[in-house]
Image (tube, rainbow, N blue to C red):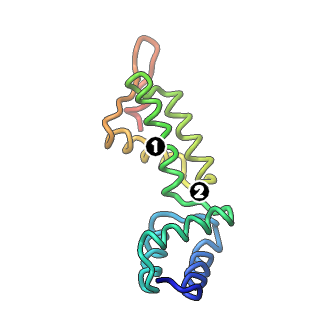
Amino acid sequence: MVTEDIKKSFVDFVMLQVFDDQYIDRAEEKKILAEGIKKGMSVDEGLATMRQVAQDKGFVLERDAEDRAKDTLEAFANNDGKVDKKEFTDAIAILKKHSKGKIPEHEMKKRLKNMMEENGWKAKEGGLFGSKWYSAI
């Protein structure tokens, strides 16, 4: 069982990690969770506490921002079987908004393309007046 002192110490550690940029990337998340384990917390308890702190203080968890973009891409892919350029751009906008612009645009495009490939979602490109927008990423 996690005592209030342990939880407070963990929350303070989370606050220290996001002090400069209010953003928790995957590397910081792993570091924070490792600290929680050292303090006797489970991974689930640490993640729940970290998410609660992020929600209360307006911090961004990179994992959550990516999950929102992934859900959006999935909805677009399931709609007609493919993701077109506008839908992909909309997913980038969602990732940008929920990551508060902390991820460079070229990195966002790469991550979303990787998500599409990992999940077997196809891109709609080409055609008579189309471009190779997806292949260019």
Element at label 2: loop
On the image, the x and y values in percent for residue 44 come to 44, 69
Q: Which mark is residue 11?
A: none
On screen, residue 72 above or below 18: above
In the drawing, does residue 47 fall left or right of residue 123? Answer: right
Please tell me which residue is depicted at 59% across the width and 56% down the height of the picture: 102
Q: Quadrant of the C terminus?
A: top left
Residue 8 image-quadrant placement? bottom right
On screen, residue 44 above or below 40: above
Element at label 1: helix
In the image shown, does 85 or 73 lie closer to the viewer? 73
In the drawing, does residue 131 fall left or right of residue 55? Answer: left
| Amino acid carrying mark 2 in the image | Lys
User: Is tag 1's residue or tag 2's residue first in the polypeptide sequence?
Assistant: 1
In the drawing, does residue 51 fall left or right of residue 122? Answer: right
Which residue is the site of mark 2?
Answer: 102
